[in-house]
C-alpha cells in the first residue's frame, strides 16, 4: 500500500528506500536487539531455555506497569500544554512517601491479616492519589499557569525548580538515604512458577492495580465530557475556548489526573520495592519520560506500551549488564529514539519532534 | 502553548526600568575597572583563607556560566547536561596531569614542561596550558557530538537529550573503574591500549577519584602552592578575561547574530540563509569548550577529579547562574555566577550552617541547597524572567506576551 501511494513521476532519491525502512522499523529493531540477543545467548549457552529471559520480562512487566502510570501523567500534560513536567517524577516520589506514611499511621504491619490489609490498602490508594494529584495541580497553578504566555523555556525552568524543591521536601521528610518500609504484601513471595518463570505477589499487585486504572483512564478520556474537553484543548486551546470549554479548568484537571496516577504508582512502587527515598522520583521521572517518548508523546496507549517496554529493558540490563549501568542504558535508548523516531511508536509528528 | 491566550494573571514585570540603560561607553569603561578591582582583590585577602578560595571558585564558575550562556542564552538551546563538559575537562586534567596512567612509558611517565616535583612521577604530566587546550578541544568535539541528535529537535526535547547525555557521562565517570571500562578490554583498540597503559588501566577512578592532580606550573614562576591561593585566583581571572573576550566578540559577530536569529525564529533565520546545522553545532562546541576550560582548572585547583562531582544538580547550578543574571546578557551572567557560587560555596556551607540548630532541627544545611536553587529558579521565572541584568533583546522577548508581540506587528504594518 505504501508503495502505491508514492507518486510514480518522482524518482526516489538514492537510499530513500533504506531511509523509509529505518524510519518505519528502525525503532522496533533497536528495541528488539537486547531481548533477542540475550535470548539467543541463553538458548545456546548454559541455560538452554528461556526461563531467565522470561523472568526478566515478567519483572519488567510489573516495573513497566508502574512506569506506565507515571508516563501517562507526562504524556497527558505534554499533550495539553506541550510542557515536560519535570516535577512529575517528584510528584510520584511524594505519592510513595504519602502512601508509606499513611499506611504506617493507620497501623498496617507485616502481620496484619489479609482482609484488613486489603481494606487498609484500599484506603491508602485514594489518599496517595489525592495527595499527589493535589500537589501536581498546585504546581500547575503556581508555577506554570502564570507563564503560559511566556517563552517555552520559562515553564520548563520552573518545572526543574519545583523538582528540586520537592526533592528537598523528600529529604526533610525522610532523610537522605534509602529507607526500608514494611513489606506488607510480601512482595517477593512466589505465587506460582510456570516454565520456571516466577510470578510473585508484587507482580500480581502491580499488574492487578494498573490494568483497571488504565482501563478506567482510557474510558474516562474517550467517553466522558471532561475527557472530550481535554482532547479538544490538547488539539487547539484557542478553538476549545471559543467552543465554551474552560481551558484553565481543563488543564488543571489534566494535572490532577496525571498526579493521581503518579500517586497510585507511588503506592505500588512502595509496596513492590519496599524501599523508598527522595531520589526515586528523579530516576522514575526520566525513565517514565523515556517511556512516554518511546510510545509517542501525547498518546496514552503509547505511554503504556513504552512503559512496559522500558521496564523490560531495565530488568534485562539490571540482570545481565549490571544495575549501575541501567540508567545509562535507558538514556542511550532515549537518545536512539530521538535520533530514529522522535515521534515514537504510536505517536504522530509533533512540532517539537518534527 | 503559544496559542493559549494570556490569562488575566499573567506576570507582568514590575521593574522593567531597572537597571537603567547604560550608554555603550559605560560598558566599555566598566571592563578595565572590573579587572583592576578583581586583580587587586587577593592583595587584601588572606593567602589561604576561605574568602579567596570562594572567590577563585566563583571565577571558575563564571567561565562555566559564560559557556552555558552561549548555548542557552545566545542560541536558545536549553542544555541540561552541561555537567558533561565539566566532567570531560576535569578528566582531561586528571589524565594528563597526574600519575593516573602509571604504566605509561614503562612506568617512567611522560613529562612536558612540568615542575621538578612532577618530573619524577609516573604517568602523563603536561603543562596546564597544554591540558587546557586539550580540554577545550575534547569538549568542543563532545559538545558537537551531543549536539548532533538534537539538531532535528526543538525546545523541551533538546533539554531532555542533553540531560540524558550528561547523565550518561556521569554514569561513565562513576562506573569508570568497572571491568567493562578497562582500556585493554575495549574492542579494536584494546590491544594497543594494553601496550601503552598496561592491562589494568581503567578510564576513570570512579568514586575514589583521581588525586593528586599536578598543580599549575609556569616555567620561571614560583610553583603554585595550596597554601597560597593568590596565583590560582589570578589564573582564574585570566580565564575569565579570555571567556569574556570571546563572549563579547562572538556576540557581536556574524555567528553571534546567527545564533540570536535562530533563537528568535528558526524558520525565518533558515529561510534568510542562516546555516542551521553549522550554527547550532558551533554554539554547542564553543559553549562546551568554556566548560572544559573551567573543568580543567577546577580539576587542578581542587586537586581531585572525583565522579561524585559530576551530578545533575551541577548542571542546574550553572543554569541557575545564567538565568539569575539574565539569559544572553554577558555581564548579567557574570553577576549571576558570582552570586550563586557565593551562595553555594560560602553562604550555605559556612554562614547558614548553624541555622538548623537554632531552630532545633537536625539536618545538614547543604542538603537544602537543591531546594534553595529550585526556589530561586521558580521565583526568577515568575517575578523577573529576564534576569537581574537583562539583555535588551531577551528582555523584550521574555516580558512581552504573545498578544503584545502580535500587536506590535500590526503597528509596524499599519
Image (tube, coloured by chain):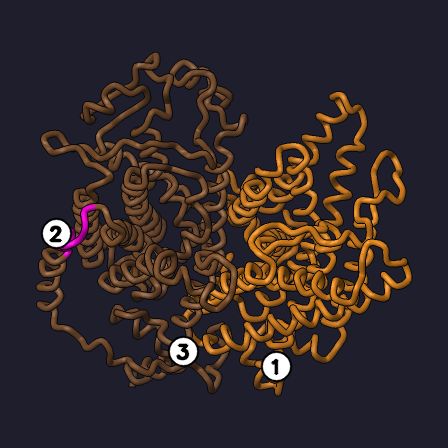
Q: Can you say whether B201 is above or below B394 in the image? A: above
Q: Colour of chain B?
A: brown
Chain letter of disc 2 in the image: B
Residue A162, x across and y down, in percent: 50, 66
The colour applied to the residues of chain A in this rendering is orange
Structural crowding at the residue carrying mark 2, measured as other residues with C-alpha within 10 Å and reported as few (<14), some (14–19) or many (≥20) = few
Q: Chain of mark 3?
A: B
Q: Which residues are magenta?
A: B38-47
Q: CA distance from mark 1 to mark 3?
A: 21 Å
Please state the chain letter of the residue tagged with numbered disc 1 in the rendered image.
Answer: A
For residue B262, above or below residue B211 = below
- Nearer the viewer's eye, disc 2 or disc 1? 2
**Most frequent secondary structure within the magenta stretch:** helix
- Asked if marks 2 and 3 touch (Cβ < 8 Å), the reply is no
Q: Residue B43 lies in magenta, yes or no? A: yes
Q: Which residue is mark 1?
A: A249
Q: Secondary structure at mark 2?
A: helix
Helix, strand or loop at label 3? It is helix
The residue tagged 2 is B43
Amino acid at each position: 500500500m505504501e508503495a502505491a501511494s508514492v507518486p510514480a513521476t518522482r524518482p526516489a532519491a538514492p537510499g530513500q528506500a533504506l531511509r523509509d525502512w529505518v524510519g518505519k522499523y528502525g525503532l522496533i529493531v533497536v528495541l528488539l536487539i537486547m531481548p533477542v540477543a540475550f535470548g539467543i545467548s541463553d538458548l545456546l549457552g548454559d541455560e538452554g531455555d528461556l526461563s531467565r529471559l522470561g523472568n526478566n520480562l515478567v519483572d519488567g512487566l510489573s516495573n513497566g506497569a508502574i512506569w506506565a502510570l507515571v508516563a501517562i501523567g507526562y504524556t497527558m500534560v505534554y499533550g495539553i500544554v506541550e510542557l515536560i513536567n519535570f516535577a512529575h517524577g517528584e510528584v510520584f516520589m511524594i505519592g510513595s512517601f504519602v502512601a508509606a506514611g499513611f499506611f504506617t499511621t493507620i497501623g498496617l504491619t507485616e502481620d496484619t491479616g489479609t482482609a484488613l490489609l486489603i481494606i487498609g490498602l484500599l484506603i491508602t490508594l485514594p489518599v496517595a492519589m489525592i495527595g499527589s494529584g493535589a500537589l501536581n495541580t498546585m504546581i500547575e497553578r503556581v508555577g506554570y499557569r502564570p507563564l503560559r504566555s511566556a517563552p517555552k523555556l520559562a515553564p520548563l525552568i520552573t518545572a526543574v525548580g519545583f523538582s528540586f524543591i520537592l526533592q528537598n521536601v523528600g529529604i526533610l521528610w525522610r532523610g537522605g538515604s534509602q529507607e526500608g518500609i514494611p513489606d506488607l504484601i510480601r512482595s517477593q513471595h512466589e505465587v506460582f512458577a510456570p516454565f520456571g518463570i516466577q510470578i510473585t505477589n508484587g507482580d500480581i499487585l502491580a499488574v492487578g492495580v494498573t490494568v483497571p486504572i488504565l482501563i478506567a483512564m482510557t474510558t474516562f478520556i474517550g467517553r466522558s465530557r471532561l475527557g472530550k474537553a481535554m482532547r479538544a484543548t490538547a488539539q487547539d486551546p484557542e478553538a476549545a475556548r471559543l467552543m465554551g470549554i474552560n481551558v484553565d479548568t481543563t488543564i488543571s484537571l489534566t494535572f490532577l489526573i496525571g498526579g493521581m496516577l503518579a500517586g497510585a504508582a507511588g503506592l505500588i512502587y512502595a509496596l513492590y520495592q519496599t524501599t523508598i527515598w527522595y531520589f526515586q522520583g528523579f530516576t522514575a521521572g526520566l525513565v517514565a519520560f523515556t517511556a512516554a517518548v518511546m510510545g509517542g508523546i501525547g498518546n496514552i496507549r503509547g505511554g503504556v506500551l513504552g512503559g512496559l517496554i522500558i521496564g523490560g529493558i531495565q530488568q534485562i540490563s539490571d540482570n545481565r549488564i549490571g544495575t549501575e549501568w541501567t540508567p545509562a542504558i535507558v538514556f542511550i535508548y532515549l537518545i536512539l529514539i530521538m535520533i530514529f523516531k522522535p515521534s515514537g511508536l504510536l505517536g504522530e509528528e509533533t512540532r517539537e519532534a518534527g | 502553548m503559544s496559542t493559549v491566550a494570556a490569562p488575566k494573571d499573567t506576570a507582568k514585570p514590575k521593574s522593567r526600568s531597572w537597571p537603567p540603560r547604560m550608554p555603550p561607553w559605560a560598558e566599555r569603561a566598566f571592563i578595565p575597572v572590573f579587572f583592576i578591582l578583581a586583580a587587586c582583590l587577593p592583595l587584601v585577602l588572606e593567602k589561604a583563607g576561605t574568602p579567596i578560595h570562594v572567590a577563585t571558585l566563583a571565577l571558575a564558575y563564571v567561565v562555566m556560566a559564560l559557556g552555558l550562556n552561549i548555548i542557552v542564552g545566545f542560541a536558545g538551546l536549553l542544555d541540561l547536561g552541561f555537567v558533561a563538559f565539566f566532567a570531560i575537562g576535569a578528566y582531561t586534567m586528571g589524565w594528563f596531569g597526574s600519575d593516573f596512567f602509571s604504566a605509561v612509558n614503562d612506568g617512567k611517565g611522560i613529562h612536558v614542561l612540568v615542575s621538578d616535583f612532577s618530573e619524577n612521577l609516573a604517568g602523563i604530566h603536561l603543562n596546564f596550558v597544554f591540558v587546557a587546550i586539550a580540554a577545550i578541544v575534547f569538549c568542543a568535539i563532545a559538545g558537537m557530538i551531543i549536539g548532533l541528535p538534537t539538531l532535528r529537535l526543538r525546545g523541551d526535547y533538546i533539554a531532555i537529550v542533553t540531560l540524558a547525555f550528561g547523565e550518561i557521562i556521569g554514569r561513565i565517570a562513576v562506573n569508570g573503574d568497572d571491568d567493562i571500562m578497562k582500556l585493554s578490554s575495549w574492542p579494536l583498540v584494546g590491544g594497543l591500549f594494553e601496550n601503552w597503559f598496561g592491562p589494568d588501566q581503567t578510564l576513570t577512578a570512579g568514586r575514589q577519584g583521581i588525586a593528586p592532580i599536578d598543580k599549575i606550573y609556569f616555567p620561571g614562576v614560583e610553583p603554585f602552592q595550596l597554601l597560597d591561593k593568590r596565583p590560582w585566583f589570578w589564573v582564574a581571572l585570566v580565564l575569565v578575561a579570555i571567556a569574556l573576550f570571546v563572549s563579547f566578540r562572538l556576540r557581536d559577530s556574524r555567528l553571534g547574530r546567527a545564533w540570536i536569529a535562530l533563537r528568535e525564529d528558526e524558520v525565518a533565520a533558515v529561510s534568510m540563509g542562516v546555516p542551521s546545522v553549522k550554527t547550532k553545532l558551533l554554539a554547542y562546541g564553543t559553549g562546551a569548550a568554556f566548560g572544559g576550560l573551567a573543568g580543567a582548572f577546577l580539576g587542578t585547583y581542587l586537586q581531585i577529579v572525583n565522579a561524585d562531582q559530576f551530578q545533575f544538580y551541577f548542571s542546574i547550578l550553572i543554569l541557575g547562574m545564567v538565568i539569575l543574571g539574565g539569559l544572553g546578557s554577558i555581564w548579567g551572567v557574570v553577576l549571576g555566577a558570582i552570586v550563586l557560587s557565593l551562595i553555594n560555596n560560602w553562604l550555605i556551607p559556612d554562614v547558614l550552617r548553624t541555622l538548623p540548630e537554632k531552630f532545633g532541627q537536625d539536618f545538614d544545611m547543604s542538603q537544602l541547597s537543591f531546594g534553595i536553587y529550585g526556589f530561586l529558579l521558580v521565583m526568577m521565572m515568575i517575578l523577573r524572567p529576564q534576569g537581574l541584568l537583562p539583555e535588551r533583546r531577551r528582555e523584550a522577548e521574555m516580558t512581552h506576551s504573545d498578544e503584545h508581540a502580535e500587536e506590535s506587528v500590526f503597528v509596524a504594518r499599519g
